[in-house]
Image (cartoon, rainbow, N blue to C red):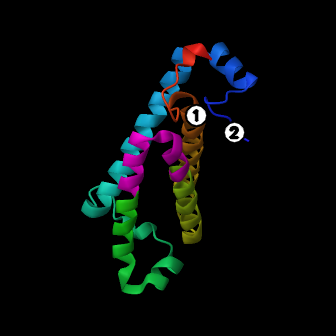
Amino acid sequence: MATTLENPTRSDRQFVNSVPRGAAYEAYQILHAAFVVAPLLAGIDKFSKYLVDWDIYLAPQVAKMLGQHAHQFMLLVGIIEIIAALGVAVKPRYFAWVVAVWLVAIIVNLLMCGTFFDIALRDFGLFLGALALGRLATLFDPPAAVNLNTI
């Protein structure tokens, strides 16, 4: 069971006191920024296709099921990615987990394509980063204002 700063365990206190605060917080900030910028840019690009034609990444089975609505589905995906990015910006404690689940769905879709294994591997790395952000956010994005120096 995960603990929070509202009810920190001895190991949470040991972690906060043993890790150089600057390094842990800097890692959190890097991940926080990355998981705002990356999904935001990918979501926006679903509409402009400046970076890539995102429709090619939709698994053939899914595209067939959607029929003529495959492109509209990818636009919906873009909207969801923009919302997820804004959620991470405001409350990474919760939305990092949303992004992690979203990345699993993307990985499954890419594996169903049978050709984008390299991109699926990259997205697995992003999935691990989202998990790390979610864990670090339990320390640095508390549910209420908590002074870490008093723990």
The circle on residue 66 is none
Say which residue appears at 58% left-offset and 70% top-offset.
112
**19 above or below 130?**
above
Q: Bounds of the magenta span?
A: 81-98
Secondary structure predominantly adopted by residues drawn in magenta:
helix
Asked whether, in this view, residue 143 is left or right of residue 45, the answer is right
In the rendering, at what x and y percent does residue 34 appear? 43, 38
**What is the three-letter code of the residue carrying label 1?**
Thr
Asked whether, in this view, residue 38 is left or right of residue 138, the answer is left
Say which residue appears at 40% left-offset and 35% top-offset.
33
Sequence order check: which comes first, mark 1 or mark 2? 2
Is residue 12 in sight in this rendering? yes
Q: CA distance from mark 1 to mark 2?
A: 9 Å
Say which residue appears at 56% left-offset and 22% top-offset.
24
In the rendering, at what x and y percent does residue 113 appear? 54, 70
Q: Residues within 10 Å of mark 1 (few under 14, many from 20)?
A: some
Which quadrant of the rendered structure holds the N terminus? top right
Q: Which residue is mark 2?
A: 2
Q: Which residue is mark 1?
A: 138
**What is the three-letter code of the residue carrying label 2?**
Ala
Q: Nearer the viewer, residue 135 or 109?
A: 135
Marks 1 & 2, CB-CB < 8 Å contact? yes
Which quadrant of the rendered structure holds the C terminus? top right
Say which residue appears at 56% left-offset and 19% top-offset.
148
Report helix, strand or loop for mark 2. Answer: loop
